[in-house]
Amino acid sequence: MGDKSKHSFPHHTTMIETKTLVAPANTDLGHAKEVIQSVYKQVFGNRHLMELDINQSLEALFMNGDLTVQGFVTALAQSETYRKLFLEPNSPYRFVELNFKHLLGRTPHDQAELMSHVRLMNEHGYEAEIASYTYSEEYLRVFGVDQVPSNRSTQTLTGGRAVNFPRAAAVDAGYAGFDGAEKGSKLLSSLTTGSAPSIIDRKSVGNANALRIIWTSGRQIGANRRAVQKSVVSQTSMSATIQSILKQGGRISSIAKA
C-alpha cells in the first residue's frame, strides 16, 4: 500500500464505469483492488490522493469481506480526508452539492432538497449527513450494497428532465480535474430560480458555444444510418433537442462542447 501511484487515477471521463463485487473479496483480490480504485475515484471526485490520505485499514476490511461497497463508500465519505477536502474549504451548500454528486451520482432536484440536507447537517452533524445518502432508499434501489456509485445524469435525462444535464455539468470538474470549490454558485442559482445553468463560455465566438449531443436511436434505422447519432446545437435549443430525442425513444450518451 506504500506505492503512491497505486491510486493515481486515469483522466476524467463523461461516463464512470460501475463496478460490482461479484465474489467474496478475499477470494477475488484482483477485482477487489479494482473496486477500491473505482470507489476512491468516485467518492473523492477524481482527486489524486497522497499516501497519507489512503485509508489502509478500511481497505483491509473491504478486502477481507468485512465491509460491503456501501460500507466502504460511507466510511471514506465520513473520513477526515473527505471532510478536509470538501467540507472545510466550502460553504454548506457547496458541500451538499458535492455529496449528491459523489454519493448518489446526481445533483439535487431542487432548492428544497438541498436545504433539507443543510438543515440535517446543522442539526445532526457531519456523519448523519453522509449516512443520509449512502443508507437512503434511493441509494439502495440504484446501487445496492455492492455497486460503486456513478454519474447518473444521462439516466435522469431518460426520465425526461432535460435540466438535469446542465446542472450536472455545472458541478463537473472537467477533463482530468477534481471537484474544487469554484463551481458551486452556478448550481445554487439554478436551483433557486428553477432555470438551467449556463454550461458554455459566454466569451466564446463563432461556433465555440455549440454543444454536441451523442445519442442512441430507439427506432429501426436504415442501412446507411448509424445507430449512434450526433446532434450539434446551441444551449438555447438543447432542451428542445433532448426532449425530441427522448420522444423518439432515444437515449442520451453524452453532452459536451462541440
Image (spheres, rainbow, N blue to C red):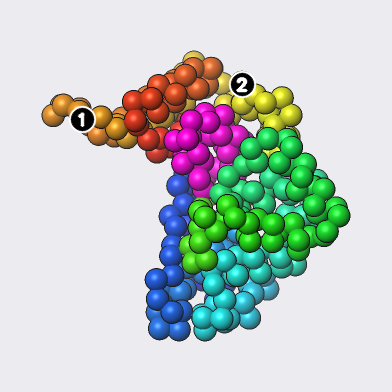
Which residue occupies 56% across, 34% down? Answer: 164
Tell me if residue 119 comes above or below residue 41 in the rendering: above
Q: 171 or 136: which is nearer to us? A: 136
Check disc 2 and report the residue beneath it: 202
Question: Residue 49: which quarter of the image?
Answer: bottom right
- Residue 213: image x %, image y %? 41, 29
Which residue occupies 65% across, 24% down? Answer: 195
Which residue occupies 40% across, 76% down? Answer: 23
Mark 1: secondary structure: loop
Check disc 1 and report the residue beneath it: 220
- Please state which amino acid type lies under the numbered disc 1: Gln
Report if residue 12 lies within the magenta region: no
Report if residue 174 lies within the magenta region: yes
Tell me if residue 182 comes above or below residue 146 in the rendering: above
Identify the image quadrant of the C terminus: top left
Which residue occupies 58% across, 45% down? Answer: 106
Q: Which residues are magenta?
A: 151-175
Tell me if residue 165 comes above or below residue 91 in the rendering: above
Q: Is residue 30 left or right of residue 169?
A: left
